[in-house]
Amino acid sequence: MSKPEYSIVIGLEVHTQLKTQSKLFCGCSTEFRPDEPNTQTCPVCLGLPGALPVMNQEAFRLSLMTGLALNCEIAHETRWDRKQYYYPDLPKAYQISQYDQPFSAKGWLDVPPEKPDGQPTRIRITRAHLEEDAGKNVHDESGRGADSGVDLNRTGTPLLEIVSEPDIRSAAEARRYLESLRTLLLFLGVSDCNMQEGSLRCDANVNLHVRGTDGSIVATPIVELKNMNSFRNVELAIEYEVRRQLQQFMKTGQKKGDVPKQTRGWDAERGETFTQREKEESSDYRYFPDPDLQPVVVTQEEIEAIRRILPETPAAKRVRFCTQLGLSEYDADVILDQGPELTGWFEDVATLCGDGKTAANWVTQDILRDMKSRALTITGFPITAPVLGTLLKAITSDRITTKSARDVYATLLRSADAAESITVEDIDRIIKEQGLEIVRDTGALDQAIQTVISAKPEAVRDFLNGKQAAVGPLIGMIMKQVAGADPKQVRERLLAAIEATRPA
């Protein structure tokens, strides 16, 4: 059977833990403490008889911020439902969630194109709703035994579930959607999005629409992929699942309904998915309104008040960086992908030096390189935004050359490595001590040029005979004689002097 035409259909369900100090319906801490299991629980999150939940207002506020930033329609009234299922890590045997009346729906998120000259892809958001998290099953992976335990510290932690429409058409696009969503959540300040700690989790619903020889479309059964702990693993799992479903279709020629929907896990070590169970339908959860919680009513005035305090989104920043600061889309994305702290740091530097492109070049190259080599975040980096901004201002004002600025920067880092404090005043001191200020005395420069021309007549002849590279060593000699000379000015005056020696 030849390989048929097909399209990939992907919808993503993203769960992000909201940045609150206490859980969704009780006062227990949400701090991540894997080495202290079952120390952050109470009768409410354990579901003990007689314990009544009370909604965390801050969790609802952060959810509203996210819904508005995702361009969702915000419901004026939302209610809580009980989602019935039993796992060892769910002591109540139900999860408080939102089903019939979520607080937001019908939104969208624009995803940057794969290629710089492409157009963004708009992925529709079906709904975003609040729910409480379950606990975590902990298994002995030492090989010495088969003991398992349950850590209920996470039980009741506020989660925001963001469900996309099946608008995603490739594994790479799914990854870009997740990266864009994570960046948005970080800039909103609603979550730390730490996948290693479970603060951001993703399930992918994947199937294929296969075109038959008669032109009809056959949809393979939807598979929900779980256990993916990184964006790269999401991409790899979807790529594998697409190949598996296509091979299965080509082997069996299945019709819709021949194979049930299923949930499959991702085995990162083997690079393949594996069957876990048949996929549940909503009816399997036997949703009904939670009798212990009142509906939440939000006025239009409250919605507008939150809308007014929304920070600038990463998408808006990207446009501003490119149109107002002259950055390339690549540079803008590199900066934004580092998160809100470094992005704000970059904006401070750009404002101080008055040149966004110069600031971007230094941040994306020197700063990120040295942060990585020192294993530091921007908040712990010894070169502050005022210091770098002042240094770059010396370049943009033609006080020193870029090469000289790198010498100053290296000196500052050496001082920091020696545990010395660094201030803006150090820049002026280093420039003067090392004689790095651009030479304005063209007389001294012209004298050095004539000295070099006289000392290297063979290089002058080579240049006059068309060998352009012959002037490189001459420029180096002049720069050594005249500290702080501008290489551009040296080259221009040297070439003019050499041309003056050309025979008539």
Image (cartoon, grey):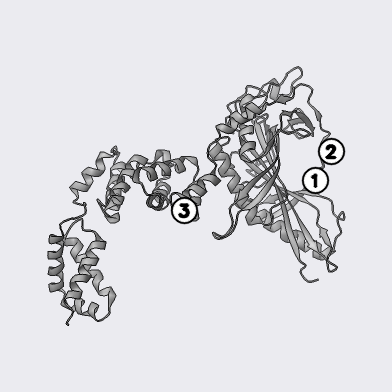
Give 67 or 32, whichever is nearer the viewer.
67
Q: Is residue 295 above or below residue 339?
A: above
Residue at 77%, 19% (x, y): give it.
49
Secondary element at tag 1: loop
Please rate how many residues cluster around mark 1, counting C-alpha atoms within 10 Å: few if below 14, some from 14 to 19, many from 20. some
Asked if residue 485 is positioned above or below residue 495 in the image, the reply reads above
Residue denoted by label 1: 279
Q: As drawn, which residue projects farthest toward the top? A: 50
Name the residue located 41 percent from the left edge and 46 percent from the top edge: 371
Q: Is residue 268 visible?
A: no
Badge 2 is on which residue? 284
- Cα separation, mark 2 vs mark 1, equals 10 Å
Q: Amino acid at mark 1?
A: Lys
Q: Please report whichever mark, 3 or 1, sits nearer to the chain's N-terminal start.
A: 1
Q: Quadrant of the C terminus?
A: bottom left
What is the total number of numbered labels drawn onto the structure image? Answer: 3
Query: Which of marks 2 and 3 precedes in the sequence?
Result: 2
Q: Residues within 10 Å of mark 2 (few under 14, many from 20)?
A: few
Residue 185 position, x and y percent, is: 58, 40
**Kind of element beneath mark 2:** helix
Q: Position of residue 224 (x, y in %)?
A: 74, 48
Q: CA distance from mark 3 to mark 1?
A: 42 Å
Indicate which disc residue 230 carries. Answer: none
In the visual, does 384 lie left or right of 160? Answer: left
Please name the residue shown 84% across and 51% down the image.
260
Q: Amino acid at mark 2?
A: Asp
Quadrant in which the N terminus is drawn: bottom right
Report the Cα–Cα distance between label 3 and label 2.
48 Å
The part of the image, by quadrant, that contains residue 36 is: top right
